[in-house]
Image (cartoon, rainbow, N blue to C red):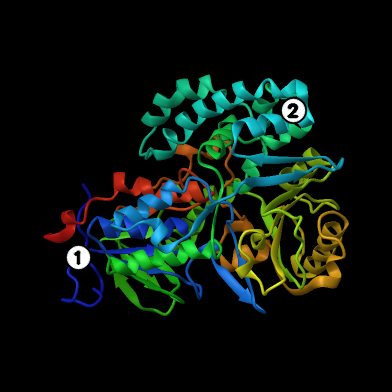
Amino acid sequence: MLKRTPASTPINPGFDERPHAIVIGSGFGGLAAAVRLGARGYRVTVLERLEQAGGRANVFRQDGYTFDAGPTIITLPFLFEELWALCGRSLSEDVAMVPLKDFYTINYADGSTFTCVQNHEAMRTELARLSPGDARHYDRFKEESRKIYQFAFEGLGQIHFSNMWPMLKALPGFIRHRAETSVYQYVSKFFKDERLRFAFSFHPLFIGGNPFQSTSLYALVAYLEGKWGVHFAMGGTGSLVKGLVGLIEGQGGSVRLNAGVSQILVEDGAATGVQLESGETMGASVVVSNVDAPTTYGKLLSRHPRKTWTDRKIARTRYSMGVFMWYFGTDRRYEEVPHHSIILSPRYKGLIEDIFTNKVLADDFSLYLYRPTATDPSMAPAGCDSFYVLAPVPNLDGDTDWDSMAESFRQRVEQHLSDTLLPDLKAHVVTSKVMTPNDYRDRYQSVKGAAFSIEPVMLQSAWFRPHNKSEEVDNLYLVGAGTHPGAGVPGVISSARILDQVVPDAAVFAHV
């Protein structure tokens, strides 16, 4: 049981006597945490240092075009439905969530393609089109994927690792599912065609992981997508952010923008509130940080002695790759380009090694292309398209000078897109914006500009990640990509779900 610590400066004293909870950061993890705390009797204040809510899921509008800044693939919509239900509402009242018929199309360097869909028989037909010999193994792979999903997501992904015991209990499952092997190695047991090996093992890249090193447990994605599909929130991912902010305000909570936090205040070993960059202090019974976990410890708790997440450990931690993002709008529509596309370099494994191991910016690249106007034309002016393209690149452990390299790299990406999916692109781009790992470091406070925080390797997963209940300070909790269970929309929403197990109900503080 956590003890009550005195609040430094109560907000609106006498107006709302509910125990106060502060959430630092308004990414999906922070917003979901705020909703859950509000449903359990807290008065919640979300503090966001940027000019809008959403964290990496923020939105920007430029020249009549709407761009989702970050996550665009929505799986497991029931995680959002659960948050709305906590507020006595339905997700559909605020957000139109549309299932996509085609999840994404992979464009291989040899000119062949593979489209991932939800229907099981259609997927098997698609496999047979590429590799008839491999198609007969798909049913067995899908069943193994189901078992891994039950173990890894429904089991491990919902557990709070306060000690090693849950890890020890899970050891038989780790052994059974060959968790020590990489997802690429695991998938290769079922498929011989290298194109299919990629199609069923690349998913760690969506959360900053190396498919040749990330655990086989990521093979769960095949079942996850087949069972629940891939969805798009009309208006863009930002409509989910707007909806969550509305839920928080409906609970009597608030979201303060341009309110950066400089320090978490600690008294007698417990968090008691925060100090803002403006110098203002705010008291709280509970503090939740949605800031990148290494930044939470290395910056927001820099004045507090730490036994586990020391500066030395933070420096030695392995971080995810960076990303290069180019947002652009065209004055024409590319009707044959689907909602999600992947364009592969012929040098896939070598490129991955350059990104994750060598930390060098290679001459080639693989790309993820997002065209939301394929589903929602309102995200661009009439007759136009809105895009972003993402290229995995080394994080700032490498020596790339992005200040001088960004534009030349963008031009290379533009030319490659023009040569592949978007003919004559340069002549049709009318608005443009670029983000590099420098922006992730400066705008999102991500250590080393890592787009997905701590790299999801075996010894940095589950118990080995920063815990949801801080190991350093009482009354402090962590959510988001850098804590358990990890990055990606389902992961960060689940990190907030875990708070229900470790944060006391507000009634504990109400009369203390």
Could you tell me which secondary element the residue under label 1 belongs to?
A: loop
- Amino acid type at circle 1 is Arg
Q: Determine which residue is flagged by label 2.
A: 128
Q: Position of residue 328 (x, y in %)?
A: 72, 68
Above or below for 127 versus 208:
above
Residue at coordinates 50% horizontally, 59% vertically from top-left?
295
Query: On the image, which quarter does residue 21 sit in?
Result: bottom left
Label 2 packing within 10 angstroms: few (<14), some (14-19), many (20+): some
Q: Is residue 321 left or right of residue 93?
A: right
Q: Determine which residue is flagged by label 1.
A: 18
The C terminus appears in which quarter of the rendering? bottom left
Q: Nearer the observer, disc 2 or disc 1?
A: 2
Q: Is residue 16 left or right of residue 123?
A: left
Above or below for 344 versus 67:
above
Q: In this view, does 187 lie to the left or right of 145?
A: right
Q: Nearer the viewer, residue 204 or 414?
A: 414
Q: Position of residue 397 (x, y in %)?
A: 69, 54
For marks 2 and 1, the one nearer the N-term is: 1
Q: Position of residue 269 (x, y in %)?
A: 29, 55
> For the view shown, which residue lies furthest in the left direction?
511
Q: Nearer the viewer, residue 265 or 107?
A: 107
